[in-house]
Amino acid sequence: MTLYHRRTGDHTDRQLHGLVRDGSLARVRRGSYTDGELWRSASAADRYRLAVHAAMTGRARAVASHDSAAALLRLPVLGPRRDRVHVTVDGRGGGKTTAATVEHRVPLSEVDVTVVDGVRVTTPARTALDLACVRPAVHGLCAVESALRLGAEDVPGVLERMGRRHGIELARRALTRASPLTESLGESFSRALILGWPDIPEPRLQHTFHDEHGRFVARTDFDWDGRVVGEFDGAVKYESGGLTVVQEKIREDELRRLGIHVVRWTWPDLLHPERLHALLLKALRPSR
C-alpha cells in the first residue's frame, strides 16, 4: 500500500475528510492516508506495518523498536501488540507515551540498527531482547528463539550493549534459556511453558530416531529419554490434504513400533496450558 502524507496545498482538510468519508482514502495516522479499498482488504498486521511507516516519517533520531520492529522484521512473537507504534531514541530518561506512540529513551548503538523498507529498525536480536525486558517470561523466551531462527548473531553482545535498564534481568534469563533448535513459534511457546513446570522434565529437541536396521524413522520436536515423543501440530502441517495426514500416521506408527509413546498438541492446548500440562503428566507417568 502506498502512503500519502498531508502537505500544505495538496488538499484542504474538508477535501480530505470527504475522500475518507466516501472510502477513497483511509486515514492511517494523523496526516497520513492510503488507498481506501486496499486498506479495507489488508490484514491487521499489514495495517500496523503501514502505521509504523507513517509514524516514522520525519523522525530522524528515532528507530522503530519492540513490537513495531518485530512487525517490520516479520519476527514471530506471541500476542503482538498493535495499539501503538514503539520507537527508541538513544539516551536515558525512560521516554514518553501518547495515545498513538510509545517512545523508549534507552542506550542504543548504531550496530544494533538495520533498515527495512526504508525504515530504521532495531535488529532482530535487539528487538527480541527489548521485548524480553517488558513482556512476560514466556513471551520473552519466544521472541529470543524467533531471533535465533532468523539468524541473529552475537546476542550476548547485544545484551551487553543494552546496559543497566529496567527488565534487563528478564532479558538475560530469556537468553540463558533460549535454544536455537526450536523450529517455530509454536515449538518455542511449548518449550517455554514446559520449562515453567517443575514436574515436567526438560525435553530433548529435534532428536533423530532410527529403527533396528539403521533406517531413518523421524526427527521429532521434543522427546523424553527416547520413550515419550512430543509433537506440536501447527495447522499448516495438514493443509495439503489427505496425503500429509497419511504420512504423519505412518511416521507415528513407526515410532510406536520402537516402543515410543507419541503425544500431540495444537495451538488451543497452548492457549489453555493446563491441557498440555495434564497431557504430558499422563504420558510421562513411570508406569508407561
Image (cartoon, grey):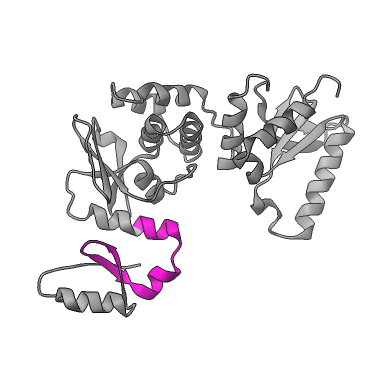
Range drawn in magenta: 27-49
Residue at image point 80% right, 22% down:
285
Tell me if 102 is positioned left or right of 14 in this view: right
Viewer-side residue, 60 vs 54? 54
Residue at image point 82% right, 19% down:
286
Viewer-side residue, 162 vs 218? 162
Quarter residue 217 falls in: top right
Q: Position of residue 90 (x, y in %)?
A: 20, 34
Residue at image point 29% right, 56% down:
53
Give the vertical position of 151 relative to 28 (above or below): above
Q: Verify whether residue 48 appears in magenta.
A: yes
Residue at image point 87% right, 31% down:
258
Viewer-side residue, 177 vs 112? 177
Q: Which quadrant of the figure contains the N terminus?
A: bottom left
Would residue 223 be visible to someone looking at this image?
Answer: yes
Tell me if 139 is positioned left or right of 96 in this view: right
Quarter residue 163 falls in: top left
Q: Position of residue 18 (x, y in %)?
A: 24, 79
Q: Position of residue 34 (x, y in %)?
A: 30, 69
Q: Position of residue 144 (x, y in %)?
A: 46, 33
